[in-house]
């Protein structure tokens, strides 16, 4: 394919993404479902060239920034608090699912080598970070379940990748050592964490010296790729390296970013991540044609592989249910004996956690990266796609109903201060500094209006924190008026510009002030 035609195809794909995302919004569907289905339908459009996905390129392009985004937005305090549960899912559940799938595949196809069965298990075992984000952003979960799923999706790719590489090596050499695999996993994970910490620390020092918003944003955008590629170059876990770097950057961004950098960077990053996530699902759908053609066509695939694929999909789902419910039973037993203060999830929480294991880009990329002469490659490739399709279309669309059915208990974790109380604490210290600086060295008041403003503001915020229920309707009405005033001011500003009374520079400056005022009002109202 000529480079110009490839570029045209990429632009067409992004236009299709916008249309599919809009359709999903209008129909109330998860965007991942619309994008995956739309990509699959586009793959069979007559005259459209076949899309060949390079698995290594897909992982390198999409995985680092998406992992970085997940690490950036995760609650670090809750991540530490629930690290044992996250490790149980990210390592234990992946190992268990891989083993169960391998056994079932070998029972169905006894002639298939154990290494190939294990490779399929490793490919489909880890739920996907991108798919998990796409599903979770449309549902509301208790914070504990949310952090377990987010933490699992960040770390389990490392487990799956290590298992997959050992299975492929075992298929090639005919030898496998469980002890060596476990040892190598910990070495890869520890090495990745060290690389991530070093890259993250270097980024913090660099950001403090750059001093330019656009350079800071550019350096931050490249951070995930740098950490991932350096980890892979040093033969450690690029996934763990990227997550470690993202956690460090997330912790320090509050102190090294200016307000302008944060606003500009967040806007750019949000759009970039949206396009990348959408492109991942669309590419998965577009690759369907190549997968089906490898299997001999739709009819042949369904006739010869339909029942085995369904059995493996059901095995995968059942294995996750067994692991989650067994883990919850262990927690309940330990709590009853007084060995832990951890609370069990309960049947509803365990069901939701089990049902949320959606597969995606990592599964497809690993399947496509199998050597051409790998035993059972076509079956593994078709089954991997079926698992992605089944989990996204079935679990992704029904998770909201499962959550409603589970009737999860209300959140018991509460921060020590509410948002209003935190605002009151900030207002007090701000008033304190203004009181100190409002007078000159001789004790003369030189900023009376500023002092009065902060005194009035602190009094109002403290009063609001004590009587929030009373003030909420008044606050909404207040900021509704502010938003109407901003909209009217913007109309007048545009009229003045169109009439030639002000120049472009004045328009840009005053429009920015109105934008900030509008964003502030929307944030306060929320």
Image (cartoon, grey):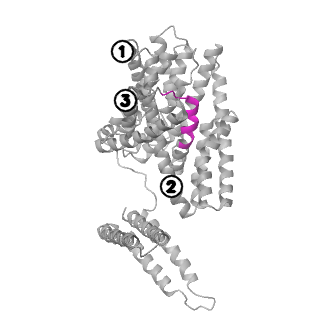
Q: Position of residue 11 (x, y in %)?
A: 46, 40
Q: What x and y, as percent, mark residue 477?
A: 29, 69
**Of labels 3 and 2, the one closer to you:** 3
Residue at image x 45%, y 62%? 417
Q: CA distance from mark 1 to mark 3?
A: 16 Å
- Taking 66 as reference, is 406 left or right? left
Q: How many marks?
A: 3
Numbered disc 1: secondary structure = helix
Nearest to N terminus: mark 1 or mark 2: 2
Disc marking residue 41: 3
Residue 185 spot, x, y in % from top left: 63, 30
Marks 1 and 2, how far apart at CA: 47 Å
Vertical relation: 255 (above or below) 77: below
Q: Residues within 10 Å of mark 2 (few under 14, many from 20)?
A: few
The reply, left or right, for residue 342 in relation to residue 494 is right
Q: Are marks 3 and 2 in contact (CB under 8 Å)?
A: no
Along the viewing direction, whichever of 481 and 412 lies nearer the viewer: 481
Of label 3 and label 2, which has the lower sequence position? 3
Q: Which mark is residue 266?
A: 2
């Amino acid at each position: 394919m000529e480079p110009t035609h490839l570029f045209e195809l990429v632009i067409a794909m992004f236009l299709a993404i916008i249309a599919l995302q809009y359709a999903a919004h209008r129909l109330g569907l998860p965007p991942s479902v619309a994008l995956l289905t739309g990509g699959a339908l586009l793959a069979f459009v007559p005259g459209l060239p076949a899309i060949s996905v390079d698995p290594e390129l897909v992982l390198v392009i999409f995985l680092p920034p998406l992992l970085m985004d997940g690490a950036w937005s995760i609650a670090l305090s809750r991540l530490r608090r629930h690290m044992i549960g996250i490790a149980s899912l990210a390592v234990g559940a992946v190992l268990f699912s891989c083993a169960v799938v391998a056994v079932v595949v070998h029972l169905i196809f006894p002639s298939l080598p154990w290494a190939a069965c294990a490779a399929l298990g490793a490919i489909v075992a880890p739920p996907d970070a991108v798919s998990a984000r796409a599903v979770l952003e449309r549902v509301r979960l208790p914070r504990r379940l949310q952090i377990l799923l987010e933490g699992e999706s960040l770390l389990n790719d490392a487990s799956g990748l290590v298992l997959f590489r050992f299975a492929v090596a075992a298929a090639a050499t005919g030898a496998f050592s469980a002890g060596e695999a476990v040892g190598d996993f910990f070495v890869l994970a520890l090495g990745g964490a060290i690389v991530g910490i070093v890259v993250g620390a270097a980024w913090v020092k660099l950001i403090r010296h750059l001093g330019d918003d656009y350079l800071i944003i550019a350096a931050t955008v490249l951070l995930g790729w740098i950490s991932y590629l350096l980890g892979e170059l040093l033969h450690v876990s690029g996934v763990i390296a990227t997550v470690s770097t993202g956690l460090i950057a997330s912790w320090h961004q509050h102190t090294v970013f200016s307000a302008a950098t944060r606003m500009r960077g967040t806007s750019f990053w949000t759009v970039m991540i949206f396009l990348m996530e959408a492109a991942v699902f669309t590419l998965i759908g577009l690759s369907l044609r190549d997968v089906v053609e490898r299997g001999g066509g739709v009819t042949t695939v369904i006739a010869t592989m339909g029942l085995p694929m369904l059995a493996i999909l059901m095995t995968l789902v059942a294995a996750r249910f067994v692991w989650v419910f067994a883990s919850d039973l262990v927690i309940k037993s330990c709590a009853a004996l007084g060995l832990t203060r951890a609370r069990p999830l309960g049947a509803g929480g365990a069901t939701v956690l089990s049902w949320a294991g959606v597969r995606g880009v990592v599964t497809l990329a690993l399947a496509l990266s199998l050597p051409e002469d790998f035993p059972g490659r076509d079956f593994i490739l078709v089954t991997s796609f079926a698992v992605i399709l089944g989990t996204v279309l079935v679990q992704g669309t029904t998770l909201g109903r499962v959550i409603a059915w589970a009737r999860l208990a209300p959140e018991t974790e509460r921060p020590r201060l509410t948002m209003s109380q935190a605002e009151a604490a900030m207002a007090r210290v701000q008033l304190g500094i203004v009181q100190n600086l409002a007078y000159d060295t001789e004790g003369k008041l030189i900023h009376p209006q500023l002092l009065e403003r902060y005194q009035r503001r602190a009094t109002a915020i403290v009063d609001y924190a004590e009587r929030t229920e009373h003030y909420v309707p008044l606050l909404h009405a207040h900021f509704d008026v502010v938003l109407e005033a901003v909209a009217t001011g913007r109309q007048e500003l545009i009229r003045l510009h169109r009439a030639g009374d002000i120049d472009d520079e004045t328009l840009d400056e005053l429009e920015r002030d109105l934008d900030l005022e509008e964003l502030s009002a929307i944030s306060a109202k929320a």
